[in-house]
Structures are given as structure tokens and as C-alpha cells.
Amino acid sequence: MDYAIEILSSEWITTSLSSIAFILFILYIGKISSENNRIKFIKIIALIMILFTVTNHVTHLINGTWTLDKQLPVHLCGISALICCVIMFIPENKRQFLFEFLFYFGIIGGTMSILTPLIDNQDSENEIFFYIQFFVKHSIIIAFPIYLRNHLNMELRTYSWLKAFIAINVLLVIIMIINSSIGSNYMYLAHVPMDSAGNVVKNPLIIINDWPWYILTWEPIVFTLILITYYFSKPKKA
């Protein structure tokens, strides 16, 4: 069962504040650590993400709930989570584009997911695991790129906002093809997100419920969010 937490409910307030606290904790540890320990700590966070990712798939396999149309890591946050898993274990000169993609879409996607949570498998014996995992993983994909920028001196390039916007549109085309091929709804490109009762989930990005119009309304919204993220995070002029 997919479980949607109602916005501004007491549960929503609790999970939102807990996520913010965890994000601030990660960033604070980076702030007070030495350069050497900063690298070690963020690698530990990456290993935690790897552990959650592997455990998630293993749990689904054991429960018999792993399906091709639900468990591929091709939602925006799933892709961001994979980047968190690998970026610190590849050569530094190969990290820049992954960092920029993670910075824009980890922060934007993770924030939207925490603010409008839709959690799967809330009727299984492992529902607590999936519940906790949802907020831990989404908190990490927000904190991770900020940590890299603030504490490991990674910076957004001048036209990174444009490259990110082009990249997300190319990715949308690929995901739409995947959805059409296997009957999935990754990135909610086949239909609007719904809970298990078939109700449209309340989401500030869903202005129009009809396909494909709601997707078209995302373009200016996402473009604006990318520009805002770049504006507040771009390298300061000397």
C-alpha cells in the first residue's frame, strides 16, 4: 500500500522537522571536522546510502514484492541516491557533472519528496523499515551535495543550470520510453501520483491532473527551481 502523509498534519510536521534535523546534523559534522575527516565522514554517509539501497531491494525480493515496474531506481530521487552511493568512490575529475546533477535534483527532488511524502509498502511486515528509509534517504540526497559544496570545495559551473535542465529533459524522454515499455509510472510521467485508494496525491507541482498537461506545467516550474538553486549556490565573485 502506498501511504501519503497529509501536508501540515502532526505526522507531517514531525517527519519534516526530523528530516531537517538530520540534514543539519550531517552538515554540522562536516563543519567541525578536519579536511581528512570530512572525506571519511561523507564516505560513511555514502555507505549508509548503499546499505539502505541494497537492503531495500533484498527486502523486496524476500517479500516477493520486487517488480520491474516499481523497483528500478529511475525516479529522480532514486537516481540521486545512486549518485550518492558512487560519487565519492570515483576519480575526482569524473565527479563534476554528477555533483551538479545531484545538487539540482537531489535538493529539489528530495525537498519535494519530504514535503509531499508518498511511502510504499506500508502494509507489509517491514513497513517501519520502508518508512524510516524514505526519510533518511531523501534527507541524505539533500544534504550530500550541500556538504560537497560547503566542505569539499566543489562548485557549480557557470552554465550548470542550463546543462541540468537539458539533462532532465533528455532523462524524461528516456523514462517515458521505459514507462511505455513496461507499464510503469517512473517520475510520474504515465499518470499523476496516486495513493493505494486511487486518490490523486496532493502535490504543489500537480496543477492539472490530465496527462500530458501536468507534465508540461512542470517545465517552467522546474526551470525556475533550477535557476533559484543556482542563484543561491553559485560561486561568489572575488
Image (cartoon, grey):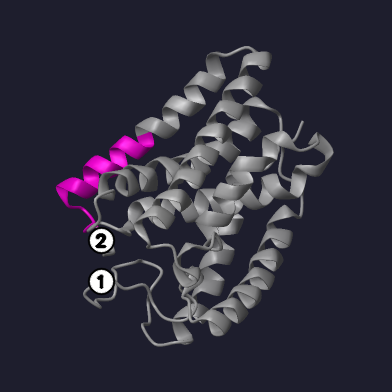
Image-quadrant location for residue 24:
top left
Q: CA distance from mark 1 to mark 2?
A: 7 Å
Residue 159 in the image: x percent, y percent?
76, 55
The answer to whether residue 223 of the structure is visible from this angle is yes
Numbered tag placed on residue 196 in the rendering: 1
Name the amino acid type tagged 2. Tyr
- The stretch in magenta equals 5-20
Which residue occupies the foreground of this view, 64 or 181?
64
The answer to whether residue 236 of the structure is visible from this angle is no
Total labels: the figure holds 2
- The image quadrant where one finds the N terminus is bottom left
Q: Secondary structure at mark 2?
A: strand
State the residue lying farthest toward the right. 93
Which residue occupies the foreground of this view, 102 or 130?
130
Residue 100 in the image: x percent, y percent?
68, 48
Decide: is 149 above or below 31. Answer: below
State the residue lying farthest toward the left. 10
Is mark 1 in CB contact (under 8 Å) with mark 2? Answer: yes
Residue density around tag 1, few if under 14, some if 14–19, many if 20 or more, within 10 Å: few
Q: Which residue is mark 2?
A: 3
**Residue appearing at x 28%, y 68% in the figure:** 202
**Reading the chain from its start, which is encountered first: label 1 or label 2?**
2
**Residue appearing at x 68%, y 57% in the figure:** 161
Residue 18 highlighted magenta (yes or no): yes
> In the image, 120: left or right of 140?
left
Decide: is 187 above or below 124. Answer: below
Name the amino acid type tagged 1. Ser
Residue 218 highlighted magenta (yes or no): no
